[in-house]
Image (tube, rainbow, N blue to C red):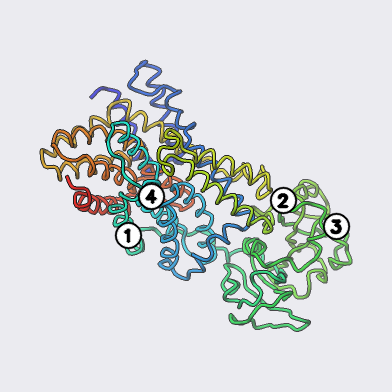
């Protein structure tokens, strides 16, 4: 083994150790390790290490760009409320961690059998975040199971993951019989079922229960906000419980005003009627969520009179100063909207509940107002004597519910376009092309053109740290491959198995699994394909079981964040540590290996 392979091995081990010890953020660490290899290549001018161009090729890969573009698609779905329309029938409102996992894992596993894993995870990430907030479940209990479920489903068909397609393409190049759409299902489905059961049973003990240091209920600002049940909306005739208004985090329904009568003690079975005026008391984050709920509109008609397009509005907080000209006057008589081109949505005053309609509230110095206004309001009023403090509320642009079906149509169109035109869906079609990226780019443009989301929202939605980690990991994987480290390790491991076909099959699976934990899943499959084909020929047995275990093993990487790019996508949002992947991923890796190696020879005989 040359010095280049030893250097790469040292860098990889150091990176894994540093990630486990959390010495620095993953994006900075992976880029730093990649730069070490680039500098070494430049100093010694060796071809066994990637140069700068080769190392950064990963940042231009279609798969990486697709992940970035898919963030924009998800933003369009979220900004229109289409994501809730899509997922609420499946997910409902779980009350326990087990219920939430069960409702989440089954649809994710099923969908990922027919769609690429990456867009599935990208679409469900904001949904999981919403479930965690509303059900008060730790994000660490849901994000990793969701990502793993997408991996399980990807092994149930030939189009579930790009790894299967890579192996299928290599088989075609060698003149071998390719597998049909659902041949891999005979092994992939039992693995998926076992994986889901494992997560439901053991994640209770193996996954951490990490919660924010500050609870939502710790916020001292308690706003009083009025919302109205929209006539003809989805909440009409539903009970308070069915509408999801009973157990909102940091928010409670204080009363309902109906035809001049006040219902003070609102029970869970109280049915909502059109034009009911609902009075809530709670914190700003929950008021923002309430504002985005389909079927509820602000009770004040001032919102609809604002001189600003919906896409240009957002919520903001402003503290009234003692020099404000309308102090001592109610909001309506003070002509607040006309004076500031802003509508008061809610008012907070020293943690006490303020009774009466919004327009009748008499402003006092120190009142905190929750406003809906043009985004320039903060800039215009930052130095005003009328307010002590003015600030934006994050992710508070009013949802564009009227465009929800447009966003859903764009999503369906993207899926149909990518599936029907790709090689995996049209035998003999366009063999060298994958239409996921063109379909995603087109869908993102349509999302912006139809104003499902704005260009600025699209840019802000992209999680650049995730893309940096994925791109740098691809470069490090290239170094493992070009230095010969991967091939040496694979040859050594397979050489230890002897002449028994079943033992060789287990060694092929094990080595592929190890590689996919360190390099990309597609690189692991590409490296192991020629080696396993040579093993099958030397033993005089069928190549098919070896191809199946390569496809399964190259996807089933759960013990590190690098095992699959979806693992990296949930690394930050779930609040995970490197050790979390090791603790739950190693037993899961071994379980998948036992099932796949045991079943494959029966379904695909030697």
486, 24: nearer the viewer:
486
Circle 2: element type = helix
Residue 436 drawn at (x, y percent): 49, 41
Disc on res. 154? 4
36, 191: nearer the viewer:
191
- Residue that protrudes farthest toward the left in the picture: 499
Q: Nearer the viewer, mark 1 or mark 2?
A: 1
Residue 74 drawn at (x, y percent): 56, 50
Q: Is residue 437 above or below residue 260?
A: above
Q: Which residue is mark 3?
A: 323
The alpha-carbon separation of the residues under discs 3 and 4 comes to 62 Å
Q: Are marks 2 and 4 in contact (CB under 8 Å)?
A: no
Residue 477 drawn at (x, y percent): 36, 33
Circle 1: element type = helix
Q: Nearer the viewer, mark 2 or mark 4?
A: 4
In the figure, is residue 347 to the left or right of 139?
A: right
Q: Which residue is mark 2?
A: 311
Question: Which badge, 1 or 4, is on the more N-terminal residue?
Answer: 4
Question: Which badge, 3 or 2, is on the more N-terminal residue?
Answer: 2
Question: Which badge, 3 or 1, is on the more N-terminal residue?
Answer: 1
Q: Which residue is mark 1?
A: 193
Residue 111 occupies which quadrant of the picture? bottom left
The alpha-carbon separation of the residues under discs 3 and 2 comes to 32 Å
Question: Which badge, 1 or 2, is on the more N-terminal residue?
Answer: 1
Circle 4: element type = helix
Question: Which badge, 2 or 4, is on the more N-terminal residue?
Answer: 4
Q: Are marks 3 and 2 in contact (CB under 8 Å)?
A: no
The alpha-carbon separation of the residues under discs 2 and 4 comes to 37 Å
The alpha-carbon separation of the residues under discs 1 and 2 comes to 43 Å
Q: Residues within 10 Å of mark 2 (few under 14, many from 20)?
A: some
């Amino acid at each position: 083994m040359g010095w280049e392979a030893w250097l790469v091995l040292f860098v990889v081990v150091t990176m894994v150790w540093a990630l486990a010890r959390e010495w620095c953020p993953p994006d900075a660490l992976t880029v730093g390790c990649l730069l070490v290899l680039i500098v070494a290549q430049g100093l010694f001018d060796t071809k066994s290490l990637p140069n700068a161009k080769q190392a950064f090729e990963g940042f231009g890969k279609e798969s990486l760009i697709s992940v970035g573009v898919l963030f924009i698609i998800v933003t369009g779905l979220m900004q229109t409320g289409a994501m809730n329309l899509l997922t609420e029938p499946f997910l409902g409102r779980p009350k326990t961690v087990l219920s939430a996992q069960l409702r989440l894992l089954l649809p994710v596993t099923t969908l990922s059998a027919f769609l690429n894993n990456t867009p599935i995870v990208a679409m469900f990430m904001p949904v999981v975040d919403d479930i965690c907030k509303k059900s008060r479940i730790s994000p660490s209990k849901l994000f990793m199971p969701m990502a793993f479920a997408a991996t399980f489903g990807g092994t149930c068909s030939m189009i579930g993951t790009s790894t299967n397609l890579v192996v299928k393409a290599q088989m075609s190049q060698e003149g071998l019989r390719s597998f049909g759409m659902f041949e891999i299902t005979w092994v992939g489905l039992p693995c998926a079922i076992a994986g889901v059961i494992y997560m439901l049973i053991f994640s209770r003990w193996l996954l951490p229960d990490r919660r924010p240091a500050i609870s939502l209920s710790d916020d001292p600002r308690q706003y009083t906000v009025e919302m109205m049940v929209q006539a003809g909306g989805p909440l009409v005739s539903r009970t308070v419980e069915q509408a999801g208004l009973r157990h909102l985090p940091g928010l409670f329904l204080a009363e309902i005003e109906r035809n001049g009568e006040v219902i003070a003690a609102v029970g869970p079975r109280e049915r909502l009627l059109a034009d009911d005026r609902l009075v809530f008391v709670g914190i700003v984050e929950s008021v923002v969520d309430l504002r985005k709920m389909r079927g509820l509109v602000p009770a004040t008609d001032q919102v609809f009179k604002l001189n600003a397009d919906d896409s240009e509005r957002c919520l903001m907080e402003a503290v009234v100063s003692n020099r404000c000209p309308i102090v001592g006057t109610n909001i309506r008589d003070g002509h607040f909207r006309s004076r500031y081109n802003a509508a008061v949505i809610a008012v907070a005053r020293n943690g006490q509940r303020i009774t009466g309609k919004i327009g009748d509230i008499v402003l006092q110095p120190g009142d905190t107002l929750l406003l809906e206004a043009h985004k320039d309001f903060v800039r215009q009023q930052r130095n005003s004597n009328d307010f002590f403090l003015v600030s934006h509320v994050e992710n508070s642009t009013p949802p564009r519910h009227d465009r929800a079906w447009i966003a859903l149509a764009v999503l369906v169109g993207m899926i149909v376009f990518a599936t029907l035109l790709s090689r995996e869906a049209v035998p003999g079609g366009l063999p060298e092309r994958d239409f996921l990226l063109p379909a995603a780019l087109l869908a993102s443009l349509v999302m912006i053109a139809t104003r499902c989301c704005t260009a600025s929202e699209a840019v802000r939605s992209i999680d650049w740290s995730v893309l940096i980690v994925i791109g740098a990991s691809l470069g490090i994987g290239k170094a493992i491959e070009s230095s010969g480290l991967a091939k040496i390790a694979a040859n050594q491991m397979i050489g230890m198995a002897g002449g028994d076909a079943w033992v060789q099959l287990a060694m092929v699976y094990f080595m592929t699994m190890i590689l996919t934990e360190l390099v990309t899943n597609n690189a692991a499959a590409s490296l192991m394909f020629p080696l396993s084909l040579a093993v099958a020929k030397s033993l005089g047995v069928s190549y098919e079981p070896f191809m199946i275990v390569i496809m399964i093993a190259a996807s089933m990487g759960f013990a590190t964040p690098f095992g699959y790019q979806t693992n990296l996508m949930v690394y930050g949002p779930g609040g995970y540590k490197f050790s979390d992947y090791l603790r739950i991923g190693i037993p899961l890796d071994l379980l998948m290996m036992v099932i796949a190696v045991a079943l494959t020879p029966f379904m695909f005989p030697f």
